[in-house]
Image: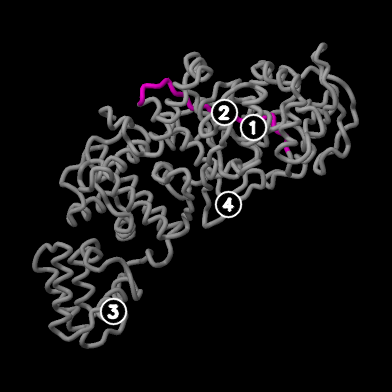
Amino acid sequence: MADEKESGVDSLFWADQIARLVKKRVAGNPVLRKVTKERGYIVYDEKTPSGKIHIGSGRGWVIHDVIAKSMLQLGLKARFILSSDDMDPYDKPNKELPKSFDKYLGMPFRSIPSPVKGYKSFAEYYFRQATDRFDDFGIEVELESTGERYVKGDFNPAIRTILDNSQKVKGIYKRFYGKPLDRMPFNPICQKCGKIATTFAYGWDSRRQLVKYRCEQNMVRWAKGCGHEGEVSPYNGNGKLPWKVEWAAKWPTVGVVCELAGKDHFTVGGSRSVAVAISDEVLGYPPPFPSTPKNIGQGYEFFTVGGKKMSTSKGEGMGFAEITDYLPAKMIRYLLVRTRPRARVDFDPMDDNDIILLYDRYDRTQRVYHGAEEVGDKEREQEKRIYEFSAVGDIEKRLPPQIPLTYASTVVQVTPDLSRAVKILQTTGHLPAELSKPEMDYLKERLGFARQWVDKLASDRYKFRLLEKSDVKVEPDVKKVMRLLGKKLLERNWKEDELLNTIYGMCRENGLDTKKFFRSTYNVLIGKDYGPRLAPFILTIGREKVAKALSGV
């Protein structure tokens, strides 16, 4: 990816700006300088695997992946780490699963069996549903388990500090919520029933390093405790910190310097506010970008589908893994890369305009990157960065053959045969006489999605079926121009603009309304009042075939 300027030093692209801000922040803080020297610049994200992970989570993953890659281009030893929050409790019945799974409510996800064979746990199954697709999306990440960090003892120092300073933690809760935390800031796993959501920690013996707790019957509405009372070491996976406290504990434990999240976490007084205060005041660790001890910063906007927000735990919305049933992963990545984190993404794969506009924008960005479309200097640099960070794998060395999606959909409906489609596209000037293997692969991908779009997603406006024979009654004035056009088509090879001008000229010379002629022609060819743009449509079908159809009316 080229020279220093292209590597983000002066770029206005959002990820480059964030990378520079993080670099500056680390340089000015001795704690962060020490952390990054030992562990690198860690960009972090986390997800609770409570069910089908929706595409909205994918926005954070792409954002963090791009930030880490921008840091690498600045010469920083950046790493993107994604953790499965598999110690969190199963707190809502999963709509995909039988009622028999309700007996696990209140237990950590990592302790629940997988609903599908071949996975270690419920948590691994749902986490991998998404992460197994990361290569398709070009996401380069180190995957880890929060539960494993607890078991290995990574959290032990933070747990002890937090329990030793429980009054401080309770005071922070009181500051933000008007009342202190009503228990010790730790959730033990019940030694008898294995539940974590039903335990109430009421004491901490600092000398013996033990937490006293009860497993309560009515701790939460959705799970019943067993009534066991005991004491347990809080270390090595015997429990977890409450979510907001755990978020703060992760930052020094992992060495995080950058972690964004959805804007719902960044409401003033919300989870980020509490985590930032605990990180700063109890753990003595500078909260990661975009937060500071005095300003929590801003999260990224939601990814909605057709205006609807999605929920993993409720099983609502389109899953991250299933989005590729509707759109190639690289196009989703492009959509997320080109949209600034603070701008909302609302995309509906069932909406013709959303799909067509996305493909048109992608093609334009690709042309700008390869110098095939002239734009101003700032826009060129912006589009180049977008294209570079949107790439899944190596970027092609020259501009691939660009077939607009709407035209590709016309071609695949005229013929399902690839070799015939290639000849059509060569005839219409969309393809060169010779295609390299990468260019052919690119073409296959575009035609393949066009076929999928027509079969599954596109509205009737973009669908048609060529008629073998038409019995449409055509008025004499229209019939006259149709037959004249049929003869004209056979005279020579036509270019789109020449053919279109000829059609308009013939209608004008014969006093025929062009809309009426177009409507009648579509009816003869496909039995509809409308269709693809007429001139390229005729050339796609083939001059001889259209001439025969028009001359036979």
Identify the mark nearer the N-term, 3 or 4.
4
Residue 287's tag is 2
Cα distance in 3D space between marks 1 and 2:
8 Å
Q: Amino acid at mark 4?
A: Lys
Of tags 3 and 1, the one toward the viewer is: 1
Within 10 Å of the Cα at label 2, are there few (<14), some (14-19), or many (20+) other Cα atoms? many
What amino acid is labelled 2 in the image? Answer: Pro
**C-alpha distance separating marks 3 and 1:** 67 Å
Q: Position of residue 460 (x, y in %)?
A: 42, 67
Left/right of residue 8 with respect to residue 52 in the rendered view = left
Q: Quick check: marks 1 and 2 in contact, CB under 8 Å?
A: yes
Percent position of residue 543, x then y:
18, 66
Q: Which mark is residue 275?
A: 1
Q: Which residues are magenta?
A: 74-90
| Along the viewing direction, whichever of 447 and 219 lies nearer the viewer | 219
| Residue in the image at 50% along x and 28% along y | 43
Q: Position of residue 540 (x, y in %)?
A: 24, 61
Callout 4 crowding tier (Cα within 10 Å): few <14, some 14–19, many ≥20: some
Q: CA distance from mark 2 to mark 3?
A: 67 Å
Question: Of the residues under marks 2 and 4, which one precedes in the sequence?
Answer: 2
Kind of residue indicated by mark 1: Ala
Q: Nearer the viewer, residue 531 or 545?
A: 531
Residue 306 vs 285, above or below: the answer is below
**Mark 3, residue position:** 520
Q: From this viewpoint, is residue 76 visible?
A: yes
Q: Are marks 3 and 1 in contact (CB under 8 Å)?
A: no
* Residue 146 in sight here: no
Between discs 1 and 4, the one toward the N terminus: 1
The residue carrying pointer 3 sits among few (fewer than 14), some (14 to 19) or many (20 or more) residues within 10 Å by Cα, namely many
